[in-house]
Image: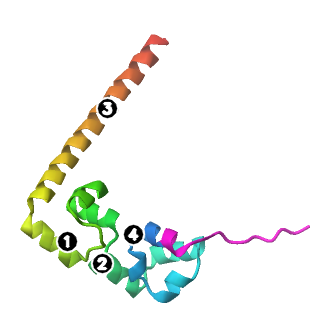
Amino acid sequence: MTTHQTSQTMKPATAAKKLGVYLQATPAEFQEGVVTRAELTALQADPPAWLRDLRRDGPHPRPVVASKLGVSIAGLARGGITEALTTEQIDALKQDDPEWLRQERSVQVDVRKEAARVKELHKEQQEKRQNQGR
């Protein structure tokens, strides 16, 4: 008995997320079809011009915008940014450096410090448990 191997597919939204691009800015054929894992791997390994352009110029999805600005996605929302932004718009925001952006960056620094502190605490507790078992 032979088995027929089918390739796994994903919705365009999932593929766009994995590629780090804004779905609505992708070509129509990408938005309307399904993407196989092999196609996704090929797009990642050798991106076509449209993908390179989107990654460079945008519009970028909110997770990418947040990362480029150094804030959380929730911080973007608190700052009134709910839509995808182009690289030019992101650069303009960085240049203007509004109060909300400075505040959200400060919050993000505090969150990262706390995460590092908790990670170190867990590491120390793990080491204590290992040493007690000896």
Is 88 on the left-hand or right-hand side of 95?
A: right
Q: Which is nearer the N-term, disc 3 or disc 1?
A: 1
Quadrant of res 115: top left
Q: Which labelled disc corresponds to residue 118?
A: 3
Give the Cα distance between marks 4 and 3. Answer: 29 Å
Q: Please say if the residues under marks 1 and 2 sit with CB atoms less than 8 Å apart.
A: yes
For the residue marked with disc 3, what is the amino acid? Val
Residue at the spot 19% in from the left edge and 71% down from the top edge: 90
Q: Which residues are magenta?
A: 1-15
For the residue marked with disc 4, what is the amino acid? Gly
Q: Which is nearer the N-term, disc 2 or disc 3?
A: 2
Q: Is residue 79 above or below residue 88?
A: above
Q: Please say if the residues under marks 2 and 3 sit with CB atoms less than 8 Å apart.
A: no
How many numbered marks, from 0 up? 4
Query: Residue 3: within the magenta?
Result: yes
Q: Which is nearer the N-term, disc 1 or disc 2?
A: 2
Count neighbours of disc 3 (C-alpha within 10 A) and say few if under 14, some if 14 to 19, many if 20 or more.
few
Local SS, label 2: loop
Q: Which is nearer the N-term, disc 4 or disc 3?
A: 4
Local SS, label 4: loop
Give the Cα distance between marks 4 and 2. Answer: 10 Å
For the residue marked with disc 2, what is the amino acid? Gly
Q: Residue 134 placed where, x, y %?
A: 48, 11
Circle 1 residue: 90
Local SS, label 1: helix
Give the Cα distance between marks 2 and 3. Answer: 35 Å
Q: Please say if the residues under marks 4 and 2 sit with CB atoms less than 8 Å apart.
A: no
Q: Please say if the residues under marks 4 and 1 sit with CB atoms less than 8 Å apart.
A: no
